Amino acid sequence: MKSAENKPLFVTGKVLENRNINGDYFEIVIEAPDIARNARPGQFVMLSRWNINNLFLKRPFSFYQIDAEQGRFAILYKKIGKGTEILSQSKKADQVELIGSCGNGFSLPENVGKIALVARGIGVATLLPLAIEGKKKGLEIYSFLSAREKNLLLGPDKLGPLSSHIFYTTDDDWKGTDGKVTFFLEELLKNNRTDFEAVYVCGSKRLARHIRELQKEYHFAAYISLEERMGCGIGACKGCVINTIYGYQRVCKEGPVFPLEEVILNE
Amino acid sequence: MNNKVDLSINLGNLQLKNPVMPASGTFDIRDTILNKEQLNSLGAIITKSIASHKRLGNPGPRIWETEAGMMNAVGIPAEGFEYFKENILPLLEDFCVPIIVSMVGDSITDFCQLAKKLDNFEKISALEINLSCPNLNDGLYFGTNKDVLGDLIYQLKKNTGKVVMAKLSPNVTDITEMALTAEEAGADIIIIANTFLGMAIDSEKLIPRLGNKVGGISGPGIRPIIVRMIWEASQRVKIPIVGVGGITSTRDALEMFLAGASAVQVGSANFSNPYVMLNIIEGIAGYLNKKKYKSVKDIVGLIK
Ligand SMILES: Cc1cc2nc3c(=O)[nH]c(=O)nc-3n(C[C@H](O)[C@H](O)[C@H](O)COP(=O)(O)OP(=O)(O)OC[C@H]3O[C@@H](n4cnc5c(N)ncnc54)[C@H](O)[C@@H]3O)c2cc1C
Ligand SMILES: Cc1cc2nc3c(=O)[nH]c(=O)nc-3n(C[C@H](O)[C@H](O)[C@H](O)COP(=O)(O)O)c2cc1C
Ligand code: FES
């Protein structure tokens, strides 16, 4: 899993497009060839569109789409605070500062078979590039999406065409799933005896815990992409740790993708 | 044009080709964006504080941004001396700038034993003593209790031939008193200062923002306090002072020289701008040129 990735670079990127998707969700496209060239699904960038005396730290964002050839990538982000507020005002040709690509991304299974992608809310941003790469490799993709409300379900338009099966739940409409979209995954494993080469989860520790339970019974490989507050994004400050069976590990360096069974989730 | 000015500075026996270096814990030789040539253009290279034995550090969250900087409650996660010797020291061999090893300890004995071990490595030029840690014997912070501080530095000097840099805690009433104590006890250089203790609370979740509840404030917000402390201490202390706290630009670094610091360390500003130290080195040369000073030594302590 922990392949040697390229060393992160510190570069200026150019905003090509920034648009509101719905509500507080935005998609920004950034041109930064040196970063796009080496970007891998599951990796992220540290970004600022502000001066250090304005906001002191950069903010981490996953790659949502990667176009190495055109030298650009997209980020799907939710406006939740000061940094994302400033980012949401980006216009074409604005400059952003970037450190990337950071962290260890996802790896796909060796075997050609089925994989399951489980995302809640903005978590789908992290999983989309994986779906694109998986599809290229000939994997069959099952997607499981969850959100607070129906109109906040992100990604069906993008993930739909890549998936052979797609399942949703929203907090206002459970469809008898006890609120968990992973209930559908359980059904597939239990009743249809579907075999998954790997399950990937992002955006919800609650869903991850359910997958961990299922993993114990059905023995599939599973990976989780985690978030923590970050200082440097490159492993230097030791500020972004999570607890694992091997002790504290840095989300920005050993992660953000971890084998699910290594992460201690009960916090 | 800039190459006419002299950026070199002597901190006692420690000779630096320029007065800018990273602050401990904000820089890691294994995880830096700077390449070898850029690293060799710094005044010195400093390690994260190391300890004699493995330390885990604090539970997360370890970082919280403030209005003018940040707080950290990383603690001092460290692999211990053996790991340092096997895995980090060899990486430092390659560089042609002074290597400073920052160290923490649980007790005076612990500090002294570690210093003795580090004394064997020629590559290490100086030991930076992180005084912002509690003495397990009496719970007092080395850096906030004059007697413990003096005793520690005095004992350390007996166990090492290396240059000893005392990194003071700013969480004291009178920094000059602490600086004088370190000087009398035999410290070669004084560093002003480590982070200020602070706390932030999430009023929605009703929990502290940091896993350790309290943490150290760094960044621009603390700079005026640090500048004042450097200025005060420099009126009385004879050994060189290194300034650290809130530097994000050349102008910030210049303030510290003018207040009395002979060199500066740059900490958390590296996170947002990994090239900040390189920019500052160039900026100082530009300033000296513009103001027609020949050497950075000419501006140290200009403000009386
Ligand atoms: C590896 C990684 C990848 C990420 N990818 C994406 C992505 O693709 N799209 C996206 O929208 N976001 C992503 N995030 C989260 C994103 O970094 C934060 O939303 C962003 O830093 C918020 O900045 P802000 O200045 O707007 O908010 P702030 O003003 O810093 O914070 C506003 C509020 O949000 C809370 N908050 C801030 N950051 C987080 C966080 N990471 N988790 C939980 N609560 C938080 C704060 O506690 C505060 O209450 C990612 C985070 C990590 C670590
Ligand atoms: C994430 C982080 C980790 C730190 N770790 C250490 C450390 O291990 N030892 C130490 O002496 N100081 C440590 N410090 C303090 C810095 O070296 C420096 O004194 C302080 O951050 C003030 O400088 P700044 O405002 O330029 O960051 C740390 C600071 C930060 C932000
Ligand atoms: S954010 Fe600095 S080590 Fe991860």
Image (cartoon, grey):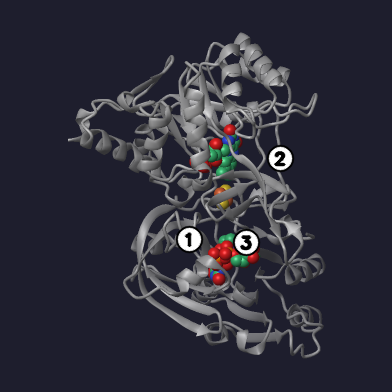
Name the quadrant of the N terminus of chain B.
Answer: top left
Name the amino acid type tagged 3: Glu
Residue B4 is left or right of residue B30, and the answer is: left
Dot 3 crowding, Cα within 10 Å, few <14, some 14–19, many 20+: some
Label 3 residue near ligand 1, CB within 8 Å? yes
Q: Which mark is residue B56?
A: 2
Residue where numbered disc 1 is placed: A45
Name the amino acid type tagged 1: Val
Please give the chain letter of the residue carrying mark 1: A
The furthest residue to the top: B158
> Quick one: SS at disc 1?
strand
Q: Are marks 1 and 3 on the same chain?
A: yes
The structure residue drawn at horizontal position 35% and vertical position 27%, both measured from the top left corner, is B302
Between the residue at mark 1 and the residue at mark 3, the CA separation in whole angstroms equals 13 Å
Query: Which quadrant of the figure has residue B262?
Result: top left
Please give the chain letter of the residue carrying mark 2: B
Name the quadrant of the C terminus of chain B.
Answer: top left
Q: Position of residue B73 (x, y in %)?
A: 66, 45
Of residue A117 and residue A169, the one placed in the foreground of this image is A169
The quadrant of the rendered image in which ligand 2 is seen is top right
Q: Which mark is residue B112?
A: none
Between the residue at mark 1 and the residue at mark 2, the CA separation in whole angstroms equals 27 Å
Of residue A104 and residue B219, the one placed in the foreground of this image is B219
The furthest residue to the left: B1
The structure residue drawn at horizontal position 29% and vertical position 39%, both measured from the top left corner, is B282
Residue where numbered disc 3 is placed: A227
Answer with mark 1 or mark 3, whichever residue precedes in sequence.
1
Q: Position of residue A39 (x, y in %)?
A: 45, 62
Dot 1 crowding, Cα within 10 Å, few <14, some 14–19, many 20+: many
